[in-house]
Image: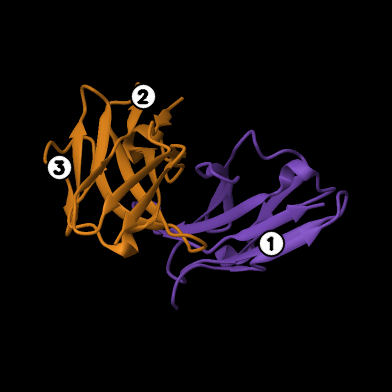
Chain colours: A orange, B purple
Amino acid sequence: AQTVTQSQPEMSVQEAETVTLSCTYDTSESNYYLFWYKQPPSRQMILVIRQEAYKQQNATENRFSVNFQKAAKSFSLKISDSQLGDTAMYFCAFMKHPGNAGGTSYGKLTFGQGTILTVHP
Amino acid sequence: DTGVSQDPRHKITKRGQNVTFRCDPISEHNRLYWYRQTLGQGPEFLTYFQNEAQLEKSRLLSDRFSAERPKGSFSTLEIQRTEQGDSAMYLCASSRVGEGVGFFGPGTRLTVL
């Protein structure tokens, strides 16, 4: 079974600054996907960024980038130039690669406990 | 089609009553997922469908829970004889085969009194 741990229950950052959210995971799988999701207050979950474990290059999406350390099983999210609209709960999530999942369990996400990020003006 | 929709958004019920939630996925998505999220926690997988077939159910899904996806379109999640521990946000998500879970609905918040 996979586990995902987010050790920072809450983080805060000033507008325009950079913040990094931590995530570690445990798995015996060699190939898998990792995700960061954003859940604004009272709004629906949004996919922020995705990383495929077999790709060494870290994923980036505009102001969002990840630092994926496969050997250390670490997957942190860096938000640059933080904006007030980045205030949300952020979840790290793991998913088996479909090739490993044998056609099942694909799409079954294992989430961490979440980190509440507050961006201050 | 603007995204995944769920109905109702809020449901308050008394212990022992049955409740049913509906999810309408993005129209071209053939995979549909149900997750449950309690306050301050990450979502937990309940079950998922590919078209009309229910391919996996979590052990969290007790005999009181049943989900259907007739004709591979919308899905319903029914909870029978609700208990206070069922109080949670129930999230639906959808995707195409071969893609990750990119689209979640707004959720149905269930409160069992």
**Amino acid found under the numbered disc labelled 3:** Asn
Q: Mark 3 against mark 1, which lies toward the viewer?
A: 3
Neighbourhood count class around disc 2 (C-alpha, 10 Å): few under 14, some 14–19, many 20 upward: some
Residue that numbered label 2 is attached to: A27
Question: Which chain's residue wears label 1?
Answer: B
Whole-Å distance between the Cαs marked 1 and 2? Answer: 33 Å
Using the rendered view, name the quadrant where residue A25 is placed.
Answer: top left
The answer to whether residue B77 shows anywhere in this view is no
Residue depicted at x 20% and y 22%:
A71
* Residue type marked 2: Thr
Q: Does residue B71 appear in the picture of this structure?
A: yes
Residue type, numbered disc 1:
Phe
User: Between B42 and A2, which is closer to the camera in this rendering?
Assistant: B42
Image point 30% across, 40% down: which residue? A33
Instruction: Residue at the far right: name it.
Output: B16
> Is residue A19 left or right of B102 when viewed as pictured?
left
Q: Nearer the viewer, residue A111 or B1?
A: A111
Residue sitting at x 51%, y 66%:
B25
Please give the chain letter of the residue carrying mark 3: A
Q: Position of residue B95 (x, y in %)?
A: 42, 58
Tell me which chain the residue with mark 2 is part of: A
Q: Can you give x and y, in whole percent of width and height, for residue B56 in the image?
A: 56, 41
Q: Position of residue A46 (x, y in %)?
A: 39, 59
The residue that disc 1 covers is B21
* Secondary structure under the numbered disc 3 in the rendered image: loop
Rendered image quadrant of residue A77: top left
Question: Where does residue B66 sit, x and y in percent of width and height?
Answer: 72, 49
- Which structural element holds mark 1? strand
Assign the C terminus of chain A to one quadrant of the image: bottom left
Residue drawn where x is 15% and y is 42% of the image: A58
Q: Which residue is mark 3?
A: A58
**Mark 3 and mark 2: span between their CA atoms?**
19 Å
